[in-house]
Image (cartoon, helix red, strand yellow):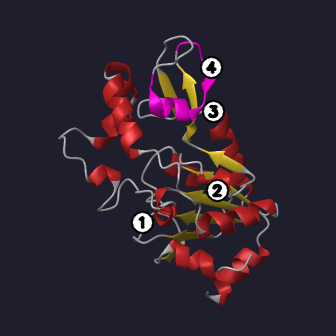
């Protein structure tokens, strides 16, 4: 670990981690946009984003359900060192996590100050009666036993609006940050990528990613495996 980078973490009191699917690949959950990611291996000819859209849920609920059930749920996945180190810093009240991930792994390591920007797969509810339903029941059927309505996971689909509280909370965290750390995300999906526009201008920005990023701002690129970086990080 570079001593200057370590000192940034040691001295920071309001770290904000902006994280994406690359954080969970070490937990054997595939990402979306890399060469072997979920969006690169589709063979149906339709844009892969379609299967995670509100249009698909409404127009072809069976297709949506099959895609989500077969490609999104990894209930046996375990958090890795990236989740663990970030969670430790949040429990010290020195960090917050704003994640695009919907896989629930941050909750499994008791992450505090967590914003699940795109929701959580394991928060399932009925579209008809609005009642919360255990995710185990959803993996058995997308029809609610109680009222016959169609169940869905509490994630933000393409062509749906974001949770306004998540937006407000995220902007506030970015404005208070004294260190911004981007981990495992291409920062190409908006409005998440737009959070950088709200950062405290005096806060250094680090990006830890396998692929080089072009963010259009001054930042430090650490092009390496994030698991190795966080394994070496003292916190």
For the residues marked 1 and 4, what is the alpha-carbon distance in whole angstroms? 42 Å
**Which element type, helix, strand or loop, lies under badge 4?**
loop
Q: Which mark is residue 214?
A: 1
> Which residue is drawn at the image coordinates 38% and 20% (left, top)?
58
Residue 132 is covered by the magenta coloring: yes
Which residue is tagged 2? 199
For the residues marked 3 and 4, what is the alpha-carbon distance in whole angstroms? 21 Å
**Which element type, helix, strand or loop, lies under badge 2?**
loop
> Which residue is drawn at the image coordinates 58% and 58% (left, top)?
18
> Which residue is drawn at the image coordinates 68% and 82% (left, top)?
6
- Rendered location of residue 223, percent (x, y): 46, 77
For the residues marked 2 and 4, what is the alpha-carbon distance in whole angstroms? 37 Å
Label 1 vs label 3, nearer the camera: 3
**Which element type, helix, strand or loop, lies under badge 1?**
loop
Q: Quadrant of the C terminus?
A: bottom right
Q: Can you tell which quarter of the image residue 230 is in? A: bottom right
Q: Quadrant of the N terminus?
A: bottom right
- Rendered location of residue 62, percent (x, y): 33, 25
Label 1 vs label 4, nearer the camera: 4
Which residue is tagged 4? 131
For the residues marked 2 and 1, what is the alpha-carbon distance in whole angstroms? 17 Å
Label 4 CA crowd tier, 10 Å (few <14, some 14–19, many 20+)? few
């Amino acid at each position: 670990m570079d001593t200057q980078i370590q000192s940034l973490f040691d001295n920071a009191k309001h770290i904000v981690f902006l994280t994406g699917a690359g954080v969970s690949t070490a937990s054997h959950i595939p990402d979306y946009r890399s060469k072997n990611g979920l969006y690169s291996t589709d063979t149906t000819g339709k844009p892969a984003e379609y299967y995670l859209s509100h249009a698909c849920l409404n127009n072809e609920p069976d297709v949506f359900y099959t895609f989500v059930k077969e490609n999104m749920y990894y209930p046996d996945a375990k958090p890795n060192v990236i989740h663990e180190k970030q969670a430790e810093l949040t429990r010290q009240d020195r960090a917050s996590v704003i994640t695009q991930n919907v896989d629930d792994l941050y909750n499994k390591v008791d992450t505090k100050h967590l914003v699940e920007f795109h929701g959580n797969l394991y928060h399932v509810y009925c579209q008809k009666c609005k009642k919360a339903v255990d995710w185990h029941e959803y993996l058995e059927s997308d029809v609610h036993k109680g009222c016959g309505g169609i169940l869905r996971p509490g994630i933000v689909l393409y062509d749906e609006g974001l949770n306004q509280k998540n937006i407000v909370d995220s902007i506030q965290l970015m404005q208070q940050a004294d260190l911004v750390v981007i981990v495992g995300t291409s920062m190409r999906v908006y409005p998440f990528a737009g959070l950088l526009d709200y950062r405290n201008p005096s806060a250094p920005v680090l990006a830890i990613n396998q692929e080089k990023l072009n963010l259009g701002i001054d930042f430090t690129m650490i092009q390496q495996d994030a698991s190795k970086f966080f394994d070496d990080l003292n916190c």
